[in-house]
Amino acid sequence: MKPIVVIDYNGGNLASAAQAARRASADLGLPNPVVITGDPAVVRDAERIILPGQGAFANCAAGLHGGLRAALDDATAAGTPFLGICVGMQLMAERGLEHEETPGFGWIDGEIARMDQAAAEGLRLPHMGWNRLDYRAGMHPLTEGLSPDAHGYFVHSYALRNWNPADLVASAEYGGVVPAIVARGNRCGTQFHVEKSQRTGLRIMANFLLWQP
């Protein structure tokens, strides 16, 4: 039985992301075990891959060593569904500009930059707390069954800019449009913390576990 893999790369929120996946999996009656691992061989053989993230873009990127980055590329190129959470989503972009320029995965267009517009409007950074998700019903399976008033829990000072509109599944408003959910092919990500977003987060996690891109 192939596992649902939560990648351990010295990032944050591993246990809570795994717990959210286990809860959603149990609710759905799925037989696949949820494991936390940094073993590239297990990642390559995964049923689905979850990449949590907390902290700086460059530090998280550097944590994907020892063959983990190659395993991620190989598995997702072969069609394994991928979910990036917070910095895990940000790493999907072409590059990050947090403190220094750091290459990302290049799976979606755009770069991760400081939310200067929000700061200029006097809004606090990091952007921390609940924000409404703006999405179009039926646009993507990840939003299936969400309330029209669904909110996600955000903690970040950097966000995706210069994105491709075709990749945008949902957004939030914080000194301008903030990409909240992105997806291209079998790779998707949420800027907000699915594992901290209560009913909305569990629904999105369940949708990911059932997703057949």
Image (spheres, rainbow, N blue to C red):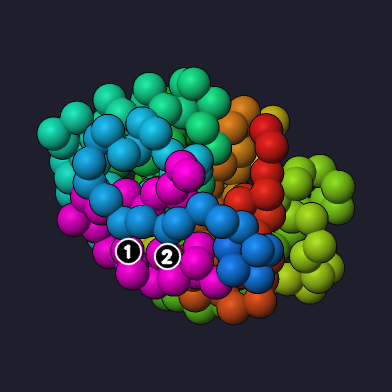
Q: Regarding mark 2 in the picture, which secondary structure is present there?
A: helix
Q: Regarding mark 1 in the picture, which secondary structure is present there?
A: helix
Residues at circles 1 and 2 in contact by the CB criterion of under 8 Å: yes
The answer to whether 15 is drawn above or below residue 108 in the figure is below
131 displayed left or right of 161:
right
Q: Amino acid at mark 2?
A: Ala
Q: Which residues are magenta?
A: 1-23
Residue nearer the viewer, 129 or 184:
184
> What residue appears at the point 36 percent right and 56 percent down from the top-left corner?
35
Q: How many numbered callouts?
A: 2
The answer to whether 33 is drawn above or below residue 81 in the figure is below
Q: Amino acid at mark 1?
A: Leu
Q: Can you give x and y, in whole percent of width and height, for residue 28 in the image?
A: 68, 63
Task: Count neighbours of disc 1 (C-alpha within 10 A) and say few if under 14, some if 14 to 19, many if 20 or more.
Answer: many
66 displayed left or right of 146:
left
Residue 199 seen in the figure:
yes
Q: Which residue is mark 1?
A: 14
Q: Is residue 17 magenta?
A: yes
Q: Is residue 9 magenta?
A: yes
Q: Can you give x and y, in whole percent of width and height, for residue 71 in the image?
A: 31, 29
Q: Can you give x and y, in whole percent of width and height, for residue 156 in the image?
A: 40, 63
Q: Can you give x and y, in whole percent of width and height, for residue 25 in the image?
A: 58, 63
Task: Count neighbours of disc 2 (C-alpha within 10 A) and say few if under 14, some if 14 to 19, many if 20 or more.
Answer: many
Residue 177 seen in the figure:
no
Residue nearer the viewer, 115 or 12:
12
Residue nearer the viewer, 176 or 40:
40
Q: Which residue is mark 2?
A: 17
> What residue appears at the point 81 percent right and 62 percent down from the top-left corner?
145
Give the CA separation, mark 1 to mark 2: 5 Å
